[in-house]
Image: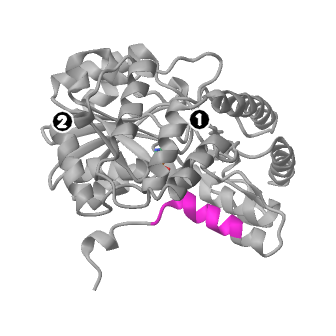
Amino acid sequence: MLSERAKNIKPSPTLAIDAKAKAMKAAGVDVVNFGVGEPDFDTPENIKEAAIKAIKDGFTKYTPVGGIDPLKDAIIEKFRKDNGLEYSREEVIVSCGAKHSLYNIAQALYGNGDEVIIPAPYWVSYPDQVILNDATPVFVKTYEKDKFILKADALKSHITKKTKAIILNSPSNPTGLTYDRKTLEDIASIALEHNLYVISDEIYEKLTYNGFVHTSIASLGSEIKNRTLIVNGLSKAYAMTGWRIGYTAGPKDIIKAMTNIQSQSTSNPTSIAQKAAVEALTGPQDFIKTMLAEFDKRRKYLVSELNSIPGISCLTPTGAFYAFPNTSKLYGKQADGKKISSSSGLALHLLEKANVALVPGDAFGNDNHIRLSYATSMENIGKGVKRIREAVSGLK
Ligand SMILES: *Cc1c(COP(=O)(O)O)cnc(C)c1O
């Protein structure tokens, strides 16, 4: 018999769609995949070389559980430079990807009876990680008219005596939108007033457009810094999803608990990947600029194409590499006598009839939308939107 815990958990829906698209591709179908949540760029050469050197040097044994000092120091320097934040080694832990960082936090903080506030739409793993740790996710709906930014009143009305934490994600996956400083100040003062922890997932920090400047909520004052756990990682900014390096900065006692938890589960993140991460953080940073310039071109093209399809409207994303168009006007229409009535119905129709893979918004807690990743070539984007346009015009 499986545990209650195992029965309550569903597999990551984004990975599921990706798997189906890859299976179709393997079977010879020409699928355009807008489902992927990782850069289509290769990991930069200098980073690969650092890993190869680590292997050759025999840096292939256990390391300290929470990461090697040179990596912690590189992370500390990143916080100082990019966010104006001071942390010590005891306030930083390196884990096997930011997803693992978030999981360690969930293990260290949440328990039976706790409520964790998650603004919706949300990244798919947040609710399930809360559930896996016996706590209850409390969703706060955000609205397209507000650019999916959490409003202070909506937050306040969801806080109870049981509320333990709130999870923020800016730039956001799935919306591609970003929190401004003023909103973060409002959220910080509410969090402090109610003694909440803030989990701030900043994995897309480096990927913003039109000169948008990312603010970390922890940088708004020492009080809120003491209540915030910043989660970040190498996956997105350095095209290193497979290397599995993420990190957390926050109060010493929580970092210590996370380190204990990690010591009983994965132990240290891969030694070789840690050396590569030191190079990523301390080596040349121009790779990010190059990747970002390409994402920016694709973003503009994809969004303007989507907005020209009748029945679809899309806000202009300011960060990450996702577009999150509203497709609700298409629901109720028919395809081959079958009614499309939801984002997953639409996603399935587009996958089967147009060979286009994307993720239905209901996976992220908003059924009126679908998510398209533009971490794919301009050529693919052009081909994909043409297919979507045709498929949508065939809906009656
Ligand atoms: C990709 C992603 C992560 C996890 O990244 P890792 O590969 O585990 O480092 C965390 N949060 C969000 C919002 C993401 O999109």
**Magenta span dominant secondary structure:** helix
Write down the quadrant of residue 270 in the picture: bottom left
Distance in Å between CA atoms under marks 2 and 1: 30 Å
| CB-based contact (under 8 Å), mark 2 and mark 1 | no
The residue located at (44%, 48%) in the rendering is 274
Q: Residue at x 62, y 15 (%)?
A: 211
* Residue occupying image coordinates x 55% and y 42%: 174
Say whether disc 2 or disc 1 marks the residue closer to the N-terminus: 2
Which residue appears farthest toward the bottom when viewing the image? 1
Mark 2 or 1, closer to the camera: 2
Q: Within 8 Å: ligand 1 and the Cβ of disc 2?
A: no
| Above/below status of 163 relative to 208 | below
Quickly name the residue at label 2.
Answer: 252
Q: Is residue 354 left or right of residue 284?
A: right
Q: x, y percentage for residue 326? A: 64, 39
Secondary element under disc 2, as helix, strand or loop, is: helix
Q: Amino acid at mark 1?
A: Ala
User: Relative to residue 195, is residue 43 depicted above or below?
Assistant: below
Q: Position of residue 386 (x, y in %)?
A: 87, 47
Residue 76: horizontal and vertical position, in percent?
A: 36, 29
Left or right, 83 with reference to 108: right
Res 31 quadrant in image: bottom right
279 in relation to 360, above or below: above
> 3 above or below 9?
below
310 magenta-colored: no
Q: Label 1, on which residue? A: 320
Horizontal placement of 391 versus 156: left or right? right
CA neighbours of label 1 inside 10 A, class few (<14), some (14 to 19), many (20+): many
- Mark 1 CB lies closer than 8 A to ligand 1: yes
Looking at the image, which residue is at 81% across and 39% down? Answer: 309
